[in-house]
Amino acid sequence: MKRLSTLLLLTLYIYNMYAQERIIILNEGMWQSDNGRISYFENGAIVSNQWFRDRNSSKIGDTPNDIIQVNEGLIAIAVNWSNIVQFIRPDGTAVAATEDIPNNRRLCSDGRYVYVTSYGHECETIYGTVYFTKGFVAKIDLSNFKVVATCEVGYEPEGIALYDGRLFIANTGGYAEQEGDHEFETTVSVVNAATMTLEKNIDTHIPNLYGEMSQCGRFLCINSPGDYYETPACGLIFDCRKALEGTDCFVRFNLPATYNTATTDGRFFVIGSAFSYITGENVFASFTIDPSTFIRTKGQAGLEHTMPGTMAADFANMSQPYGIYVNPYTGYIYGTDAGSFEGAGDLYQWSPQGQLLGKHRVYINPGHFLAIAPEDWASGVETIDHSSLTIDHCVFDLQGRRFNGDGRLKPGTVYVKDGRKTLRLR
């Protein structure tokens, strides 16, 4: 009877944990229309499609295009065309805004600093204005929300990730045709996060590393839309550890990776479209990648043309797939359809097994997601790990941030791996 009661309590606890889904969705709105919005989804329903306005009686701004959890009490949002990085609490209340990074793009954080990529050519720091020929990365000190350091990288830098004290930045050169003074970029820049100095540029020989860049431990999934003419869209798996060791560190796959996300079991879910101005065709693909296998076999294994349940068919039936995300706390999966790009889009929710659970109307161009931890997330432990765990794949802290580097977890650490909370004893 005691064993049955314990099992029942554990079942109820897991059910309640998985039932509490809290997701923030960034709706980009229409560029230069100042109509970006934030939607808030909780436990199977959209609570609000103007969540930021509800909490703060003001707009979020023009084209919000990235969101990250900084620490337990702080979230950062890059609002591209408003030229601000907005900081909010998990309840949506605005805390501060950094206004000195024009044309900001993507974010990452170590909990003390936030790092931001920018297409701009100047940045106001606490030491004065800094000017750049190309794009740059800015470092925001969370003690005062001021830019304290910068580093020039490639033209129009996009995705950014942190691993072992280094920033990895995917450069695009996306303004090549408009500005005419440079070509598409083909490099990933490696920047020392402590000193904000460029250590090296790694040439992938793949142009225009633009759009979503997901991280799973040491691995990155990077997209290239090509040049939309002769050079086709493709993607690559990038190994940050090998990049620091100076060995071959990336493998290409000839499928578009426009939108991608890390899963809770160390893989990437990928959806993509390859558009050609020559043919006018837009070819859609969806698949999964095990990055460790893909790197180890040099692309001979690890890529599967499958997704769980009905996901592949559901994405294929969308008008314009616009995003994909896995809740790191629960494994529930989300995707969005932008429709016409001018009207309200839709949010889809799937179970961890890929069963479609619902479709919800959001706002214009919903493309970016962040899960908020369930309220009782730190109150229980599901398993106890006595092994010597080396962080190599997707391991998260209780704020949903991926651990970076190869150090061992400290005793007493509660972490998340494969959708489970685990206590490190020794």
Image (cartoon, rainbow, N blue to C red):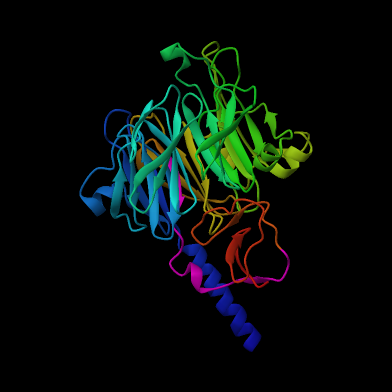
- Outermost left residue: 57
Choose top left, top right, bottom left or bottom right for residue 244: top right
Q: Magenta stretch?
A: 367-388
Tell me how many marks there are. 0
Question: Residue 367: x percent and y percent?
Answer: 43, 39
Q: Which of the pair 171/312 is nearer the observer?
A: 171
Residue 194 visible in image: yes
- Outermost front residue: 127
Q: Which of the pair 224/333 is nearer the observer?
A: 224
Quadrant showing the C terminus: bottom right
- Outermost bottom residue: 1
Q: Is residue 241 left or right of residue 121?
A: right
Is 385 a magenta residue? yes
Q: Is residue 134 above or below residue 54?
A: above
Is 243 a magenta residue? no
At 28% from the left edge and 52% from the top edge, which residue is drawn? Answer: 94
At 62% from the left edge and 43% from the top edge, which residue is drawn? Answer: 268
Question: Residue 352: x percent and y percent?
Answer: 58, 54
Q: Is residue 121 above or below residue 111?
A: above
